Amino acid sequence: MVKQEDSYKHRGMRKMLVRELKVKGIKDERVLAAIGKVPRHFFFDPIFDQHAYEDKAFPIGEGQTISQPYTVAVQSELLEVKLGSKILEIGTGSGYQACILAELGAEVHTIEYIKKLHLQSKKMLNKMGYHLNFYHGDGSMGLPEQAPYDGIIVTAGAPSIPNELIKQLKINGILIIPVGKGKSQTMIKLVKTSDSKVTRKEYKQFSFVPLRGEKGIDQ
Ligand code: SAM
């Protein structure tokens, strides 16, 4: 159910969250503005409303979570979205990260493995006025039919980096992917500098639900 109300109190809590993210090191003003704009409490059951602006992941059903705002901010910042960038998100989940990408000016393609979440997020985002490109299926090998992309963001923990994702990037395209088989994953940024070369940088540890599918934990 969409909770349409975005009250003064919600907007105030969002401002506080943005301040907290700045203190934690998020510098990209466009990312901060997007987080300040998207009503995260719309993705929560009204009885958990007060948790929406805590910097925490939260269950969204089906054993999955809406990512922690700090994680969303870090991934969005690393992705360097520009107006019109064609972005593939793997793991739509609640749809919150997809809204942030849309606010950054991206052409968003987002794929979700669990049908119920795919349908729920599509319905919710359409009601909120975000008409993005939603797909249901295994995104662990990307979405070749819409490739190439300026950026790919994976929002579930991958055991390794699928080669297919690199193939689907444009030259200078960016892949942001949390990689690790245990409870925590290292955030990795790859930039495809030519058809045969990538640069790779590692960031902090994060904790994601596992990537499913052929190149995920089911391989
Ligand atoms: N981006 C989401 C948000 O803003 O709410 C957070 C998503 S949650 C941490 C990770 C999501 O990835 C889950 O909804 C999960 O079902 C999905 N997922 C896992 N493996 C997948 C796969 N192979 N293809 C597509 N989605 C996948």
Image: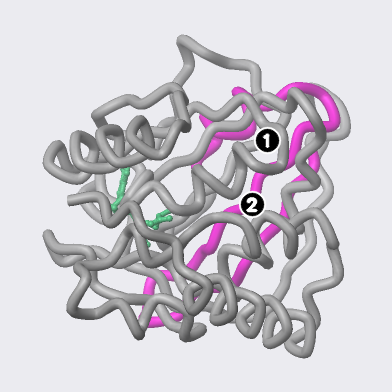
Q: Are marks 1 and 2 in contact (CB under 8 Å)?
A: yes
Q: Mark 2 or mark 1, which is nearer the start of the sequence?
A: 1
Q: Is residue 184 left or right of residue 102?
A: left
Q: Say if the magenta span includes residue 148.
A: no
* Residue at 84% in and 61% down: 29
Where disc 2 sits, the SS reads: strand
Residue 168 x/y as whole percent = 60, 23
Residue 48 x/y as whole percent = 24, 80
Report the Cα–Cα distance between label 1 and label 2: 8 Å
* Residue at 62% in and 67% down: 187
Pointer 1 residue: 151
Pointer 2 residue: 176
* Residue at 20% in and 45% down: 117
Where disc 1 sits, the SS reads: strand
Q: Is residue 135 above or below residue 181?
A: above
**Residue toward you, 180 or 206:** 206
Q: Say if the magenta span includes residue 165.
A: yes
Q: Is residue 88 above or below residue 90?
A: above
